[in-house]
Amino acid sequence: MGEAAATLTLHPLGILIAGVFALSMGGLMWWMLHPPAEMQASVAKAMHGVSAVHRILVPVRGSSYNERAVELACRLGSDQEAEIIAAYVIEVPLALPLSTPLPAEEKRAQEVLARAREIIEHHGLPARTEVRRERDVARGILRVAQEQDVGMVVLGINPKNLAAGESVGKTTEQLLRKSHIEVIVDMHPEVSEDVSG
Amino acid sequence: MSDPPSGAPAPALPDGGGKGTERRRDVTVWGSFMWGYADVGADIYVALGLVMAAAQGATSLAFGLAGLVYILIGFGYTELASAYPVAGGGQYFALRGLGDFWGFVAGAALLLDYTIDIALFSVASVGYLNFFWPYLVGHAYVKHPIALGPLTLHDPVLAFEALALIAALIWLNIRGIKESSWFNAILGGVDIATESSIIIFGFLFAWKPSLLAAQWHATMSHFSFHDFAYGSSLAIISFVGLESISQAAQVTRRPATIIPRTSITLIFTVFIFAMAFSTLGLGVMPWQTFRDNIHDPVAVLAHHIPRIGMVAGPFAAFLGVTILAISANSGIMSASRLTFSMSRLRLVTSWLDKVHPRRRTPVRTIVLFSMIGALQVLLSAFTPQILDTLGNLYAFGATLGYILVFISLIKLRFSDPVTPRPYRVPLNLPWTRKDGTRVSLPILGFIGLLGVSMIFFEVVYTHRIGRIAGPTWVLLCLVYYALYRRSQKLPIFGSVPHDWEKEQIEVLTSAEEFDLLEQYKHALAARDRKRT
């Protein structure tokens, strides 16, 4: 053991270092003792159920409620930067071959999908559009979902139908019954049908 | 390593002494921090005198350089321990990343360190006990060398005291020592408060920048690269003990949330203490005083602070005795835990896992590794400086283990990108592989690997004993490994198949890290979808 030196020495730099040391240690300890809150298993499952969806399908027909569904899909997928697929299903009557030229419907599909793409790109998310010919709209949506390995379908429905006491619609009902993936149905009472384009 | 800081004490081995994973507990954040601090926090009590004796006026620089490498090592351990919160630490990470053979090499290096833990900290603990020599016998402690033929036992009293402490630790551990968690948490808290007080009052009342500058200039005017390299390689021992992070991760609930916080705090606390003590020391006393009091430098420094020195000196010495004895005990407990992990992974015989039928303590590992530690004390006593010799060996095992951990960190980023990493070593370069898998290259991981390799080079270059005894130990262990694997008809250089994904799910479930568990399951599903 060395002999003790009892001379008191005060130096401004020493005082500064002592202060910085005390603040650093205090700050470190405070940060350590305030960890984020615990997450329950069910909460984690619910959160990751949504954030694990990396591809969302939105069927569109050119209605305002369809465009709202595109917007909702973008918001749902924004955290995980999900790819949004906007699909327009052209229902071809059984009396006609599937490949029958339907130029007016094709043109309208492209216009509707262009608007959907604009919404998606506005969110900076990867966008894809698809025109599908099918005998039945619900079947067309399900086929696209299966082929594109989609994790979720977001569907906007017409509020006027419900207000008039009708059902949610044949397509929606079939989708809800037959889908093996998550389907979100959006009905906003103030969004009118307002088919444009 | 101390006992798990929970309400109930734990044996040296996981529950049952033979089951897969240990029961996790409600370890508080403070308790988890103390688990690591009880191990790493004691290092400065040993390292300060050793580094001062070698690096002299450039001690702060030596601590600073070693500390920067240590911070990078700490980041690596934090990432791996929070991603793989299981026992085994560096040995497990190396095995996951590089296979059974390198896992064993890392395990052998760490076992060397644990045995030196027992020896080094026992010697250091009784060194601080000798601070009280003047109070007890009326004069300062002096060595009484004994000549034994061509050899000289340089400090027989110190060696005898250390051997007595090791014997006591063996006895306590075989009986089933139950350190209480609150005792450790309080002792650790008192130690932090004491060290902080010494630093604050030291800088306020005793620090002279002119003395620091004069010592710096004196050292630099006849700078010796060899001495500085030796000092900075010894400085790494003030940061050894990061294994405790992964051991804490194994028994902590929500390790992914808690461990990054506690380990980052631990890393910076120890770094700040090392820098502060070295800077303070050089501004209060000449480095020669530390060299002359190599066994109790912190107590001597505290004793030199005006106003508080009369109390702070003995109190720091008392804390040194206690916390260093706990660290020595941690060597025994950690060796048992590591051996258990290695036997579960079929790297060593399960003979070592056998527990005492009544006490339920791993008698064989306790006795075997403690006796190796005792042998190291005895052999070191024939060298002029016991502590210096043991420090020599300590640095070799630690740096070799850290090199393998860094390589594993980098490799696992490629081979296991799906395991969620709640903490990542900062500064990463995103890169998409040919198969579309996105990985991130840890830039600091590469820098850390370079840094720790340089320290390893310094160890081999400057540590006369370490460069011979360290590799000899590893080679002897490898001979054993080859014989054991051959007897079990297992590959020597290859690996035993493991279902890591199943194990990872089990580990995350038992850790109650549900957030990570869901992330992991989704990542596996996405990967499988991509493959099909």
Image: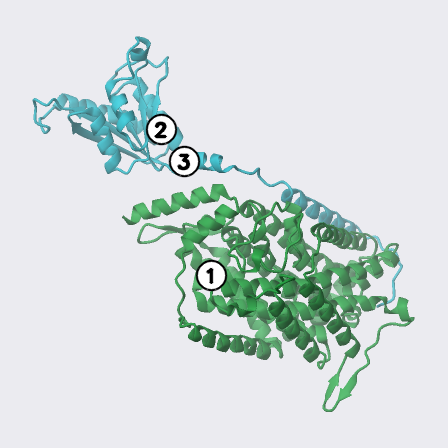
Chain colours: A cyan, B green
Residue that numbered label 3 is attached to: A49
Q: Amino acid at mark 2?
A: Ala
The answer for how far apart the CA atoms under marks 1 and 2 are is 40 Å
Residue A189: name its quadrant.
top left
Foreground disc of the pair 3, 1: 3
The answer for how far apart the CA atoms under marks 2 and 3 are is 15 Å
Q: Does label 2 or label 3 sit earlier along the sequence?
A: 3
User: Do marks 1 and 2 share a subunit?
Assistant: no
- Check if mark 3's residue and mark 1's residue have beta carbons within 8 Å: no
Residue that numbered label 1 is attached to: B408
- Check if mark 2's residue and mark 3's residue have beta carbons within 8 Å: no
Q: Callout 2: few (<14), some (14-19), or many (20+) C-alpha neighbours within 10 Å?
A: many
B432 and B241: which is toward the camera: B241
Residue A73: image tag: 2
Helix, strand, or loop for circle 1?
helix
Q: Which residue is at 41% across, 52% downward?
A: B501
Question: From the viewer's perspective, is residue B400 above or below residue B198?
Answer: below
Q: Specify whether A41 is left or right of B202.
A: left
